[in-house]
Amino acid sequence: MQELPIPGADELKALLADIAATHMPYGMYGPKNYPPEGCPLMDLPTEYLDWFWQRGWPKGKLGRLMEQTLLIKNSGLDSLFTPFRQANGGRRHFPRAK
């Protein structure tokens, strides 16, 4: 991951809201398996985000938000998403691997 500047309080709040409002548009956490919009980025497992980190982020805003989500989660700050989860009815649950 590249060095990213530390955001101010207002920037962090806007970033968290943007991550919470963005859903995975394709892949195993996309709308096919998590209808109607896909899984919120804030609820993606770190292992899934790590996979993208190792192989390359999607282009554009989605990739930037996914990278920021991984940084937040790996920093032990996943609880910053709690207010957004509460407002949306809780965390998305994932099917158990077979």
Image: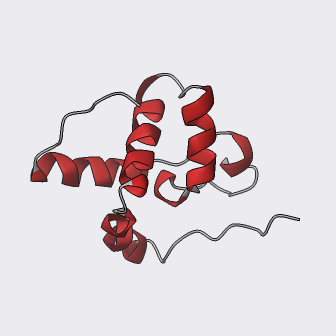
Q: How many marks?
A: 0
Q: Is residue 52 above or below residue 94?
A: above
Q: Residue at x 31, y 54 (%)?
A: 17
Asked if residue 4 shows in the view, the reply is: yes
Q: Is residue 98 left or right of residue 51?
A: right
Q: Residue at x 48, y 77 (%)?
A: 89
Query: Residue 64 appears at what percent x and percent y?
Result: 40, 32
Residues 78 and 19: in front is: 78
Query: Residue 56 appears at what percent x and percent y?
Result: 57, 25
Asked if residue 25 shows in the view, the reply is: no
Q: Residue at x 37, y 74 (%)?
A: 87
Residues 32 and 5: in front is: 5
Q: Is residue 82 above or below residue 23?
A: below
Query: Residue 16 appears at what percent x and percent y?
Result: 30, 53
Quadrant where the N terminus is found in the figure: top left
Q: Is residue 47 left or right of residue 67?
A: right
Farthest residue toward the right?
98
Looking at the picture, the colour scheme in use is secondary structure
Q: Residue at x 59, y 55 (%)?
A: 39
Residues 23 and 97: in front is: 97
Q: Is residue 18 left or right of residue 37?
A: left
Q: Is residue 25 left or right of residue 2?
A: right
Residue 80 image-quadrant placement = bottom left
Quadrant where the C terminus is found in the figure: bottom right
Residues 26 and 78: in front is: 78
Farthest residue toward the top?
59
